[in-house]
Image (cartoon, grey):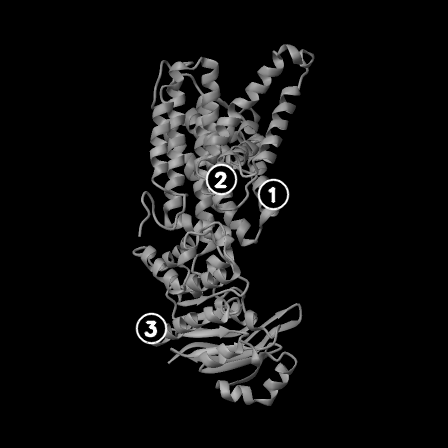
Amino acid sequence: MTRPGGLPGLGGRGTRRNLLLIALLCAVMIPLPLVLPPAQQAVAVRVLIFALMGLGWNLMSGFGGMFSFGHAAYFGIGAYTGAWLLVERGVSPWIGMLAGAALAAAFGLLIGFLSFRYKLRGAYFALATFAFAEMLRLIATNSDLVNRAQGYNVPLIQGSSLWMLQFPLGSPGYFWVALALVAAAVAVTWLFLRSRAGRFTIAVRDDETAAESLGVSAMRYKLLTMALSAAITSVAGAFYVQYYMFVDPDLAFGANVSIQAILPAVIGGVGTLWGPVVGAVVLGPLSDVTATLLRNPPEALSMLAGRAGLDVMLYAALLIVMVLALPKGLYGTLAERRRG
Amino acid sequence: MTVLEVNDVRKAFRGLHAVDGVSFTVERGAILGVIGPNGAGKTTLFDLIGGTLRPDAGRVVLDGRDVTGSPAHRVARAGLARTFQLMRPFASMTVRENVCVAALTRDRAGADERADAVIARVGLEPWRDTRAGELPTAGRKRLELARALATRPHVLLLDEVLSGLVPAEREPLLELLTGLRDAEGLTLVLIEHIMAAVMRLSDRVLVLDQGRVLATGTPEEVTRDPRVIEVYLGEERFDDG
């Protein structure tokens, strides 16, 4: 009784079409950096970093239903683990990425265990995640182990090395690596949704009491989802350091990082496979578009030229309009319509 | 053989004794009806047995294993399934996905086939691909039952599954339940307001009032009991259904 193209009992969430779509999108995107001007290429890489953070957040908060306001904790752990291992020990960023993912997952388990042990829910849970991220920011700012507020500069190497994850300025290498990471994150999410663990996680999100009464340990699947979410987000942090070649406590653990992890999913569609990617594609260029628009406004709007802060206001206004017009996100709304 | 033993179980909420020293046993393959006026503690009793609530005192023994105070998922794995009076569907999933989750808690292999079989048995096939959040009440009642059955329980606690159904819909479910009892030795404990169904289905009936056992016995004994008649006098529920 298997429906073509998917496991039964999965609805549209985990069909094989999605795997095809990942491959197809990758194929289309690979030549992109070869045709984009360098400035746009930087935007494209930023879009991919956003997408990776959003995919991580969406797993825990979208599919797991545990609203996190502290994903900076995992992003920062990924960023600092990679930076520390590279700068202090000369370890390849790839190894740093794996180590960071393991540490972030462990930290996610710790936060999760404590929060659920003391039955924090909803806004209280969100505040607890925020507090843990702030705690890490303060520790990093005050700890000699990680250079206090100075943070780390990634040492430059000669030429280009995939193993050391460093490419010359304007090389398409960064884009390709980020693209591969995002594709992997979408694939992991897809596999998770198809798995027994993924379905139990969504059951717990929909109704914890009912899931428990069927034999599903809510604690176990919540923790698992948090760990996976933390690991994915930490990879974004590790890559971020390699790309921008610098990290400090605010860039890694600041509250705006947590918001950046939330926005792609909210704009694209919370709890949908493609939502964070779609959201990142919209959000990544948006701040540039508003800045450019207001720096060189068209004739009719010339009175706006040179007013500082207007671009941020426009950016914020556009976000509000999007959330109001499409409460389930761009992708979420479209998927809903198609389903009828 | 005793499958479920509940011994002097108690639960108070802020001084209110919701369940106040309830004891009973159920034999394998038996059907026990639990009746009582609103607020008698019937659903709380189910919460205590199923592990949704932790009893203040007393013991719950399932298949010879003490499961008192175990979390609900452990009790479920030990072979006890329950339905909720206030239905708790996984609203974002289809009917089939709901039942699949339940089937998957037991076995990966063949979970979809088992889910489909259960869906057919409880008459949910027309709604198989409907999202559970969009089901009408009667459909949700059946979904509760379908999910519970998909876990292949030894003991099934049913909290008013028949109430949302019109009489014509009840009959096939009653037959299904007695069929499962006869064929697989399923043990049933059911809370029900529809007296005709309780009296027909149950081997024994437990009457609760204000958290205590008012009477137990065969349906005939219980309906003749003057205390039971007194409790029900204002409600006149014996004529229902």
From the viewer's perspective, is A308 left or right of A176?
right
Q: How many marks?
A: 3
The label shown at residue B32 is none
Picture coordinates of residue A109, whole percent (x, y)? 47, 46
Tag 2 secondary structure: helix
- Residue A148 visible to the viewer: no
The label shown at residue B184 is 3
From the viewer's perspective, is A309 left or right of A201?
right
- Residue A205 visible to the viewer: yes
How packed mark 1 is, by other alpha carbons closer than 10 Å (few <14, some 14-19, many 20 or more), is some
Q: Which residue is mark 2?
A: A337
Tag 3 secondary structure: helix
In the displayed structure, B41 sits above or below B129; it is below
Real-space Cα separation, disc 3 to disc 2, in angstroms: 44 Å
Q: Quadrant of residue A140?
A: top right
**Looking at the image, which residue is at 69% across and 12% down?**
A303
Query: Which residue type does callout 3 highlight?
Result: Glu
Real-space Cα separation, disc 1 to disc 3, in angstroms: 50 Å
Query: Which residue type does callout 1 highlight?
Result: Leu
Which label lies toward us, 1 or 2?
Answer: 2
From the viewer's perspective, is B67 left or right of A24?
right
In depth, the one of B15 and A110 nearer the eye is B15
How packed mark 2 is, by other alpha carbons closer than 10 Å (few <14, some 14-19, many 20 or more), is few
Instruction: Give the mark nearer the N terminus: 1 vs 2.
Output: 1
The label shown at residue A127 is 1
Pointer 3 indicates a residue of which chain? B
